Image (cartoon, helix red, strand yellow):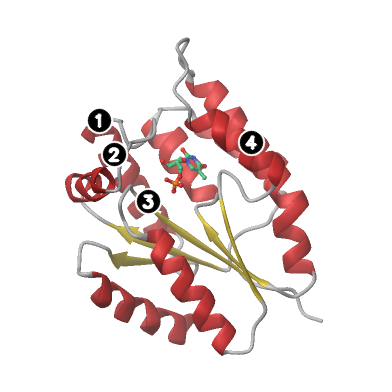
Amino acid sequence: MSRGRLITLEGGEGAGKTTHSKTIAAWLKAQGRDVINTREPGGSPLAEAIRGVVLADWAEGIDAPTELLLIFAARAAHLRATLLPALERGSDVVCDRFIDASWAYQGAGRGLPAKALQAMEDLVLDGLHPDLTLIFDIAPELGLARAKGRGNLNRFEAENLAFMQRVRQSYLDRAAAAPQRCVVLDASLAIDQVERQLRQVLESRL
Ligand code: TMP
């Protein structure tokens, strides 16, 4: 049996990834594929527990290296318990955020050096990369307004606009550097228009 495909969704806050990940899974199932939806940080019981720690507000604060290590600890647990077994049994995996988020948030956002990100990526991913990465691009002001409409903001959603602009630019730069893997979609459009773009991408890329 052939290995499943890894499809990742990325983008700033309020880009609608969660809705779109369901559309992608439904589209794949209609093609007769076995599919799982998962997310990062999270996606296994241990990784979900770490997610709770990373997103919580701590009176003592969380510095950037602690955040990086927790996110990669969650990723390592998720890969071993959920993601790799699914790919190996031939299921497609639709993952809401993955490695590009670490480069965008911990790298560009928090300013951690590329060599730290690369070391973590080499250790935890060991050469694994997504088959397709969909980047839902949205101006931070608009994304934030949408995220606020959903209720309480987590530590990342509560960051300032300059942070979010660095995150956005990092995603766009990574997409430009890997056009065979990444597709940028305009997530500022109405949801049905984004869905239309998304279906075209799925039909041409998968
Ligand atoms: P979510 O809002 O998409 O559920 O993700 C939770 C937060 O985790 C999001 O604000 C971005 C952050 N995050 C990182 O900072 N680095 C990462 O590698 C991942 C996967 C998420």
Q: Which residue is mark 2?
A: 164
Mark 3 belongs to which amino acid? Tyr
| First of labels 1, 3 by sequence position | 1
Q: Which residue is mark 4?
A: 49
Q: Circle 3 — which element? A: helix
Q: Circle 1 — which element? A: loop
Q: Which residue is mark 1?
A: 160
Q: Which residue is mark 3?
A: 171
Q: x%, y% of residue 140? A: 23, 45
Q: Looking at the picture, does residue 59 appear above or below residue 189?
A: above
Specify whether 141 is left or right of 21.
left
Q: Looking at the picture, does residue 113 appear above or below residue 191?
A: above
Nearer to us of marks 4 and 1 is 4
Q: x%, y% of residue 126? A: 72, 49
Q: Are marks 1 and 2 in contact (CB under 8 Å)?
A: yes
Compare residues 15 and 127 and report the one nearer the observer: 15
Q: Looking at the picture, does residue 88 appear above or below residue 50?
A: below
Q: x%, y% of residue 37? A: 58, 64
Q: Are marks 4 and 3 in contact (CB under 8 Å)?
A: no
Mark 4 belongs to which amino acid? Ala
Q: How many marks?
A: 4
How many other residues sit within 10 Å of disc 4, few (<14), some (14-19) or many (≥20)?
some
User: Distance between the Cα atoms at labels 4 and 3?
Assistant: 27 Å
